[in-house]
Amino acid sequence: MKSFSFAPISSKNSKILILGTMPGIKSLELNQYYGHSQNNFWKFLFSILEEEFSYDYETRKNLLVKNNIALWDVLQFCDRVGSLDSAIKNEIANDFENFLKKHPQIEVILFNGQKAAAFFKKYVHLNKEYLQITLPSTSPANAGKAFHDKLTEWNIIKTLL
């Protein structure tokens, strides 16, 4: 199945860029980042930013913008059966050179999982140095760490804002 990423969520004030790999099936169906109800991304962000959790997608997007966080995926396009990152083939990266030129405030890039970091390092070569941190995947497929342990690592966002 051919998959395309979403447009980034960002503002001119974005300081942190969080990158996933590519939306999964449920996210594509809903046309929402991290749309799978068992993905912990939104639960983590609302908790870290000390806001009341919401299922409303506009509220979720506004949470990011209000806190100067941009959200995108490393890949623009890929072939993938299912939602697992290990099934990604024929991938093409997003245009980070232009995105980062338009968002000069960004100094930190956080990766939602090892695969996002690996694809970024494979395809993206930037002239400017960014602090790059790989965090545990928020995907329900990442069952190797407990919710609390992953949330503890994701809490680094507080120190970066």
Image (spheres, grey):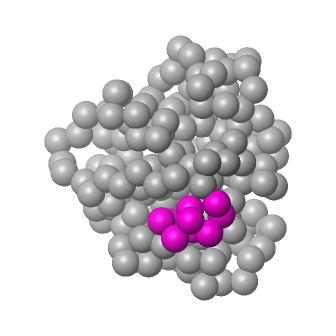
Residue situated in front as seen by the camera: 63 or 87:
87
Residue situated in front as seen by the camera: 149 or 116:
149
In terms of secondary structure, what is the magenta stretch mainly? helix
- Residue 115 is one of the magenta-drawn residues: no
Q: How many marks?
A: 0
* The N terminus lies in quadrant: top right
Residue situated in front as seen by the camera: 85 or 91:
85
Image position, residue 52 (x, y; %): 72, 83
Residue drawn at x 74%, y 77% as measured from the top left = 53
Residue situated in front as seen by the camera: 157 or 23:
157
Q: Is residue 161 left or right of residue 30?
A: left
Residue drawn at x 33%, y 34% as measured from the top left = 121
Per the rendered image, the range of residues in magenta is: 146-154
Q: Is residue 135 visible?
A: yes
Question: Which quadrant of the figure has residue 93?
Answer: top left
Residue 84 sits above or below residue 126 on the image: above
Question: Which quadrant of the figure has residue 40?
Answer: bottom right
